[in-house]
Image (cartoon, grey):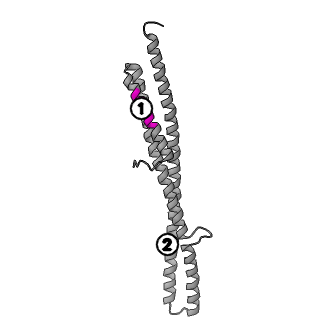
Amino acid sequence: MSGGHGAVDSSNKKVALLISVLALFLALGETLAKSAQTEALSANVESSNLWAYFQARTIRTTILKTAGEQIALDPGASPEAVKKQVEDWAKTMARWDSDPSSGDGRKELAAKAKKAEEKRDLALERYHHYEIGSAAFQIGIVLASAQVITGIAALAFAGGALGVAGIAMLAIGLFAPHAIHLV
């Protein structure tokens, strides 16, 4: 190869390698984003289920309180029977409010739901960083590809710089998702 063709071919090979590396990191970023998105959805469903159970416990407690007040007002009810029933319901309501042994009390359910919300929020933070990193890789691929057609070296450098920025966003999403607040 003579007449400068070798330099062009060498340059194109370097750009092709850059595009391959960017595509590799794009695939990694998209995989991480999908995983984080799935985790966020799962944690959101878990949180919703726990809050629904919490609400059901609250409704049941309200029903028992109302029943206790109603039975106490019944003129034909025996005071001893009313007292015993109200005490039994009070024990049930106390167990529904907090039951560390089963973890099904309202206090325990609220704590579990908040933990699931935190897990969801962390996954969403990661997801947004991964998506921005993936976008940087995609734009970098386009710019590097344009360099092959136009011969403008600055496009390859810009593509490489976007690749570095994309790697930084993946690293932030992986190791410090709260470092930069995106949403």
Q: Mark 1, residues whose alpha carbon is within 10 Å: few (<14), some, or many (≥20)?
A: some
The residue sitting at 48% across, 19% down in the picture is 13
Label 1: which secondary element: helix
Q: Residue flagged by tag 2: what amino acid is it?
A: Ile
Residue 80 place in picture, x, y as percent: 58, 92
The residue sitting at 59% across, 67% down in the picture is 103
Q: Are marks 1 and 2 in contact (CB under 8 Å)?
A: no
Furthest-top residue in this view:
2
* Observer-nearest of 99 and 151: 151
Label 2: which secondary element: helix
The residue sitting at 41% across, 33% down in the picture is 162
Q: What secondary structure characterizes most of the magenta part?
A: helix
Mark number displayed over residue 23: none
Q: Which residues are magenta?
A: 157-166
Residue 82 place in picture, x, y as percent: 56, 89
State which tag comes first along the sequence, 1 or 2: 2
Residue tagged by mark 1?
161
**Does the rendering let one see residue 57?**
yes
**Does the rendering let one see residue 137?**
no
Magenta span includes 165: yes
Mark number displayed over residue 59: 2
Residue 98 place in picture, x, y as percent: 56, 73
Magenta span includes 179: no
